[in-house]
Structure formats: C-alpha cells, structure tokens
Image: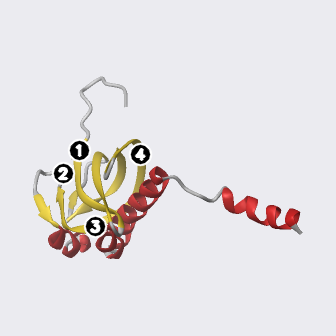
Amino acid sequence: MLRILVLLLIPCLGMAKTVEEELIYSHDKQLKEYMLNHNVEPLATMSEESYFFVAAIGLLESRENVLKTAKNLDVKMVEIANDKIVINDGTAVLSGIINIDGSVMGHPLPKKMRYLSVFVKTENGWKLQARSITPVFMPPGAPA
C-alpha cells in the first residue's frame, strides 16, 4: 500500500514550481493576454492598486488608465524571453525582451522591446507594482 501511495505522489513532486517560475509564468501569461486578447483581468488581479506603467514613449500611466486602454493595441504576435530575475526579501525584479508584431492606435510598435517588471510580496501573494517597456535600437552594424 505504501508503494502505491509513493508512486502516486512522485509525479506531483515534479509539479512544484519555484517562486521564480511562478512569477515568470504569471507575468508572461498576463502580458500576452493583455496584448493579444485585450484581456485586462489577469493584470487587474495581479497588480497593486498603486501600479504604474512607463510606456515605450516615456508616458507614465496609472493602473486605471492601463486597464482602460488595452483595446488600443492591435498585436498579432508576442514572444517573451526572460533573461533576469532578482528576488530580494519582498521585492522581485523581472527583466527580458519582448518581440512583438503589432501597433498601438494605428502606429507600429517597435519589433523588439526590453521590459522591467517589479513585483512586491503582499499578504495576498506577489503583486505587480510597476512595469517599464523600452524600445531596443541596435546601432548600425551591430549583431542582432
């Protein structure tokens, strides 16, 4: 009987995710839902009331405004490559590259952007506090 119980529990042990994996998964899912499907629910659920966003053009946007403007995006493809995550006590910083094909309010989006997302640990789990997205411009002759 004990062998059967152990055999049943072994697959469950492999399913446990680290904090880093959980943050990356929820971050990427939220970002894709927002950009591709105009679904603001994941962002509304995982962000702090005081969340803010620094847009690629330098505009500082409140959480309320970000939740209202998802429909301004027309995105056909999003690929996210996370390259750095740092967790210090109750703060986590996630950085990476977004490859994107789309537009905002009819204006083409840069094909490649770097993002920085900041999470804070609350009594309700990790919450997104801030995000910044910056276009990546390669100098002429630089490797892609």
Of the two numbered discs 3 and 2 on the same chain, state the one appearing first in sequence. Answer: 3
What is the spatial separation of the Cα atoms under label 4 and label 1, in whole angstroms? 16 Å
In the rendered structure, which amino acid carries the disc numbered 1?
Pro
Of the residues shown, which amino acid type is indicated by label 4? Answer: Asn
Q: Position of residue 86 (x, y in %)?
A: 36, 42
Residue at figure coordinates x 79%, y 66% from the top left: 8
- Looking at the rendered image, the disc whose residue lies closer to the viewer, 4 or 3, is 3
Give the residue at mark 2. 56
Which residue does the numbered mark 4 point to in the structure image?
Answer: 82
For image coordinates 26% across by 48% down, the residue present is 110
User: Are the residues flagged by discs 2 and 1 in contact, CB closer than 8 Å?
Assistant: yes
Marks 4 and 2, Cα distance to the nearest angstrom?
18 Å
Rendering quarter of residue 36: bottom left
Q: Nearer the viewer, mark 3 or mark 2?
A: 3
In the rendered image, the quadrant that contains the N terminus is: bottom right
Q: Secondary structure at mark 3?
A: strand
Q: Is residue 52 above or below residue 134?
A: below
For the residue marked with disc 2, what is the amino acid? Answer: Ala
Q: In the rendered structure, find residue 47 and report the number of the disc placed on it.
A: 3
Which label number is shown at residue 135? 1
Q: Nearer the viewer, residue 118 or 57?
A: 118
Which residue does the image show at 87% across and 62% down from the upper left?
Answer: 3
Between residue 22 and residue 35, name the one nearer to us.
22
Asked whether 94 or 124 is in front, the reply is 124
Q: Residue at x 25, y 74 (%)?
A: 71
Please name which of the two marks, 1 or 3, marks the residue nearer to the observer.
3
Residue 57 x %, y %: 13, 51
Q: What's the amino acid at mark 3? A: Ser
Q: Secondary structure at mark 1?
A: strand
